[in-house]
Image: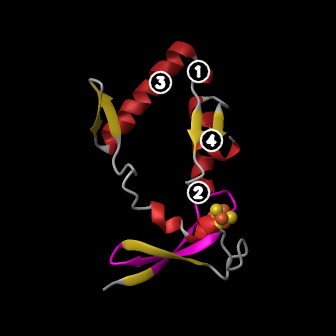
Amino acid sequence: MDYRTVLTTCTYCGCGCNVFLEVLDGEPIGTIPCKTSPVNEGKLCIKGWNVHEFIRDDGRLTAPLVRKDGKLEEVSWDEALDYTASKLKAIKEKHGSDSIGFLTSARVTNEENYLLQKFARAGVGTNNVDHCARL
Ligand code: SF4
């Protein structure tokens, strides 16, 4: 039996509370608040206490999908990224940068949200960026 705790950041909102995920034989089984974090000082809201539950949710995508002949097909990351890059490039050339928008998520870290807005602004050339926590 392999039990360990992994220090990470709660992804439910932008506060960035630190938690230890309890992992048993590779499966997340619980969440413990980090007492030394200056953000949450050992406290969590009810969402944070349950943040480990969605990691293995049955409805969660675990591989990239591309629609082919009307049906979603599992593809490699290389194929998905090539497909997405070529589509974004074609749309930008035909309709301009501001015809593209990006929606990001409260269930990723602030750093990942930062990277997406950076990609939108510096890579694609649009300020059309929004986030589900603002809706
Ligand atoms: S524990 Fe609650 S307040 Fe802290 S980051 Fe998670 S959702 Fe936000």
Q: Earlier in the sequence, mark 1 or mark 3?
A: 3
* x and y percentages locating residue 130 in the rendered image: 65, 38
Residue highlighted by disc 3: 89
Q: What amino acid is found at the position of numbered circle 1 in the picture?
A: Ser
Label 4 crowd (10 A; few <14 / some 14-19 / many >=20): many
Q: Is residue 27 left or right of residue 35?
A: left
* Labels 2 and 1: the sequence-earlier one: 1
Marks 1 and 3, how far apart at CA: 11 Å
Quadrant of the image occupied by residue 108: bottom right
Per the rendering, the mark at residue 109 is 2
Label 2 to label 1: alpha-carbon separation: 26 Å
Q: Secondary structure at mark 4?
A: helix
User: Which residue is denoted by mark 4 in the rendering?
Assistant: 117
Label 1 vs label 3, nearer the camera: 1
* Magenta span contains residue 101: no
Q: Of marks 4 and 1, which one's residue comes earlier in the chain?
A: 1
Secondary structure type for disc 1: helix
Report the Cα–Cα distance between label 3 and label 4.
Answer: 17 Å
- Marks 4 and 3: in contact by CB < 8 Å? no
Image-quarter location of ligand 1? bottom right
Compared to 130, does 24 lie above or below?
A: below
Q: Are marks 2 and 1 in contact (CB under 8 Å)?
A: no
Question: Within 8 Å of ligand 1, the CB of disc 2?
Answer: no
Residue mark closest to the camera, 2 vs 4 = 2
What is the quadrant of residue 64 in the picture? Answer: top left
Q: Position of residue 42 (x, y in %)?
A: 67, 80
Judging depth in this view, the residue of 54 and 23 nearest the camera is 54
